[in-house]
Image (cartoon, rainbow, N blue to C red):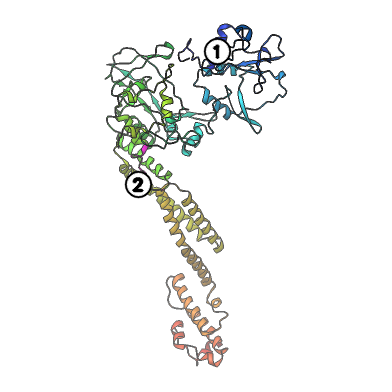
């Protein structure tokens, strides 16, 4: 049971189907009848193949966990007792629709099928399943119902249950956004309903000194994303976790990447079907290529340069080609930049990129504090893996064989998990930060943008001054609310601080607006003349206040004039005379003739005031 037979694992259903095909025994469109002799109280639906059976259906083969023994009848054994078979002996029979009492059709959602595909597509069964799904008969499955739909299904009675969340659903929220990311903007993309042409093209690479090396035979294993001790981030210590996180409650551990190796290593199997032959070149070969780009912004060109050169960090390597799990394809890039604008300073563009990345990380951070991209966990891990050469069996594939040795099972039983690479490598590697230079490059642009925003609001404020008072005040309120909304929604801390400053300034400008509205009203009152201002006087004090206001208006609205005209003097004196004549004697004693004379610029008193009334 632990050695492959004809290329199949004998524990799998695929092996059983292979045996049936080899023997020419069909599994579908068969007749069955109830096996009364072997039915029990708990298993009353056992059947066997019979040409005269009244049940038609399909045999569904499932996996075989261990060996089984044949059943021996009483007659064959020559005793009064039959021999009960051991191990898994029975397979399942799915009766055709006509032989079932109830026929129900359930719709299968794409999401449920994707769960199923995720579980089975890496198994030996998948080729047979995929082929059978496309036939009119389809594939018999075991399933569970939830309300009116299929909850989950599988190929065995005790099938693997899918996780509550798909790998995509387990991703952090920022990785599930539908927007276009920086890489898609640069290299382009194609989706069902839209596409974008890339602006970077990579040419072929040629070498003048490459020498072919010996062919190498390797086993290139496929990833098993369902193995959560490796693929899901675990909260443990020293590679041991108390309780595993899975796709149900965890998040993917990150992007898969192979270590840079000091030396290559090799691993091949006896079976040619599992092996891959690669044709490497000898170490030290130099290849030359051209990367053509157009219309890239500085931040985009900086991203491209940073990716190729590890942000200008020496002694860091990429891995190219099929053999990279075994240490082949170790490569570094040397860039000669040739831009149409004659600015070929690579650090300039990488500084723009780092500045933009740091600002974006700061925007996404909970605290809002500056979050340097250069020291982020992802970048530190990438540099650790790209710069530190590893060697030894600790960095080789985990193995499992047909003899029962399975390091994957052993690791899970021991609650082991794969820690982040920076912990494995104990690396404290940091790249040279170009943030300060990026800030120097962007500062003039940011200041200019802020100045334009401020000026646009100043222009809108100036328009308020020509509006009717109520309309001006309402529009001022709306603009104030608009600024507050922009401040609340702004994620960039620096721009948010600017909006806060502008919002604070705007709050104080209401007084300026009210003063302007009042000044505008005063101008209109001045233009209507002094006579209207001096109507409905009730006391000397009211007359005094209005005359002083008129003189103030003369200075403000008549080229700084400080003296009253003769007409204004007479009108003011007449209004005072009428007020004096109609006042009670007690109130007449309150008139201040010296002050009144000073205001009018003419001599008046209780004796001559009535003369102005006659005038």
Q: Is residue 478 above or below residue 266?
A: below
Q: What residue do we see at 46% from left, 70% from top?
A: 557
The one nearer the camera, 278 or 307, is 278
> Viewed as shown, does residue 506 lie left or right of 77?
left
Q: Are marks 1 and 2 in contact (CB under 8 Å)?
A: no
Query: Is residue 370 within the magenta segment?
Result: yes
Kindly state the secondary structure of the residue where label 1 is placed.
loop
The answer to whether residue 374 shows anywhere in this view is yes
For mark 2, what is the residue?
Answer: 443
Query: Is residue 169 within the magenta segment?
Result: no
The percent position of residue 518, horizontal first and vertical second, equals: 50, 68
The one nearer the camera, 65 or 298, is 65
Most frequent secondary structure within the magenta stretch? loop
Q: What residue do we see at 42% from left, 22% from top?
A: 406
Q: Which mark is residue 317?
A: none
The one nearer the camera, 138 or 246, is 246
Q: Which mark is residue 69?
A: 1
Among the 4 quarters of the image, the one containing residue 27: top right
Q: Please state the extent of the stretch shown in magenta in the rendering.
A: 367-377
Q: What residue do we see at 46% from left, 54% from top?
A: 457
Q: Is residue 515 above or below residue 367?
A: below
The percent position of residue 246, horizontal first and vertical second, equals: 48, 33
The answer to whether residue 615 shows anywhere in this view is no
**Seen from this angle, which residue lies furthest front?**
80
Few, some or many C-alpha atoms within 10 Å of disc 1 (few <14, some 14-19, many ≥20)? few
Q: What residue do we see at 54% from left, 33% from top?
A: 164
> Viewed as shown, does residue 375 lie left or right of 599?
left
The one nearer the camera, 44 or 538, is 44
Kindly state the secondary structure of the residue where label 2 is placed.
helix
Few, some or many C-alpha atoms within 10 Å of disc 2 (few <14, some 14-19, many ≥20)? few
């Amino acid at each position: 049971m632990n050695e492959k037979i004809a290329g199949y694992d004998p524990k799998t259903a695929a092996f059983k189907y292979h045996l049936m095909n080899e023997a020419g025994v069909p599994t579908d469109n068969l007749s069955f009848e109830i096996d009364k002799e072997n039915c029990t109280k708990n298993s009353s639906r056992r059947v066997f193949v019979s040409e005269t059976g009244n049940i038609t259906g399909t045999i569904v083969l499932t996996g075989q966990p261990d060996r089984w023994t044949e059943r021996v009848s009483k007659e064959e054994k020559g005793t009064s007792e039959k021999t009960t078979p051991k191990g898994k002996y029975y397979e399942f029979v799915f009766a055709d629709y006509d032989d079932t009492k109830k026929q129900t059709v359930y719709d299968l959602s794409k999401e449920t099928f994707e769960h199923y595909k995720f579980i089975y597509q890496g198994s030996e069964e998948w080729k047979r399943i995929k082929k059978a799904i496309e036939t009119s008969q389809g594939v018999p499955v075991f399933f569970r119902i939830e309300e009116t739909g299929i909850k989950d299904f599988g190929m065995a009675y005790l099938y693997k249950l899918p996780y509550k969340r798909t790998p995509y659903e387990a991703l952090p929220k920022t990785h599930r956004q539908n927007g276009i990311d920086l890489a898609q903007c640069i290299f382009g993309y194609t989706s069902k309903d839209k596409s974008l042409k890339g602006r970077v093209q990579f040419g072929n690479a040629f070498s003048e000194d490459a020498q072919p090396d010996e062919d190498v035979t390797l086993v290139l294993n496929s990833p098993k994303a369902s193995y959560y001790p490796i693929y899901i981030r675990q909260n443990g210590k020293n590679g041991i976790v108390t309780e595993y996180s899975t796709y149900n409650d965890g998040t993917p551990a990150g992007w898969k990447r192979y270590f840079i190796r000091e030396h290559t290593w090799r691993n091949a199997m006896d079976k040619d079907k599992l092996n891959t032959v690669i044709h490497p070149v000898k170490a030290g070969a130099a290849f030359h290529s051209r990367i053509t780009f157009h219309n890239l912004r500085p931040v985009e060109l900086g991203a491209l340069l940073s990716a190729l050169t590890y942000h200008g960090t020496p002694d860091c390597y990429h891995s190219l080609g099929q053999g990279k799990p075994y240490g082949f394809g170790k490569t570094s890039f040397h860039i000669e930049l040739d831009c149409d604008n004659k600015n070929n300073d690579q650090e300039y563009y990488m500084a723009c990129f780092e500045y933009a990345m740091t600002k974006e990380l700061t925007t996404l951070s909970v605290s809002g504090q500056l979050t340097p991209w250069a020291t982020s966990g992802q970048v530190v891990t990438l540099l650790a893996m790209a710069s530190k050469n590893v060697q030894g069996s600790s960095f080789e594939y985990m193995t499992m064989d047909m003899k029962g040795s399975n390091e994957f099972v052993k690791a899970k039983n021991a609650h082991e998990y794969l820690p982040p690479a920076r912990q494995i490598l104990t690396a404290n590697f940091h790249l040279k930060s170009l943030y300060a230079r990026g800030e120097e490059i962007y500062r003039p642009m940011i200041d200019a943008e802020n100045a334009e925003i401020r000026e646009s609001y100043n222009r809108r404020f100036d328009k308020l001054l020509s509006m009717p008072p109520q309309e001006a005040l309402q529009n001022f309120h709306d603009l104030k609310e608009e600024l507050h909304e922009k401040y609340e929604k702004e994620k960039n801390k620096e721009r948010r601080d600017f909006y806060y400053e502008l919002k604070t300034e705007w709050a104080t400008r209401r007084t300026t607006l009210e003063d302007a509205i009042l000044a505008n009203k005063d101008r209109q009152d001045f233009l209507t003349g002094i006579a209207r201002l001096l109507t409905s006087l009730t006391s000397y004090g009211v007359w005094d206040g209005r005359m002083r206001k008129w003189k103030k208006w003369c200075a403000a609205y008549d080229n700084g004039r400080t003296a009253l005209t003769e007409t204004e003097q007479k009108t003011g004196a007449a209004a005072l005379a009428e007020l004096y004549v109609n006042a009670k004697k007690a109130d007449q004693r309150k008139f201040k003739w010296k002050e009144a004379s000073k205001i009018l610029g003419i001599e008046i008193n209780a004796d001559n005031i009535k003369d102005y009334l006659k005038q």
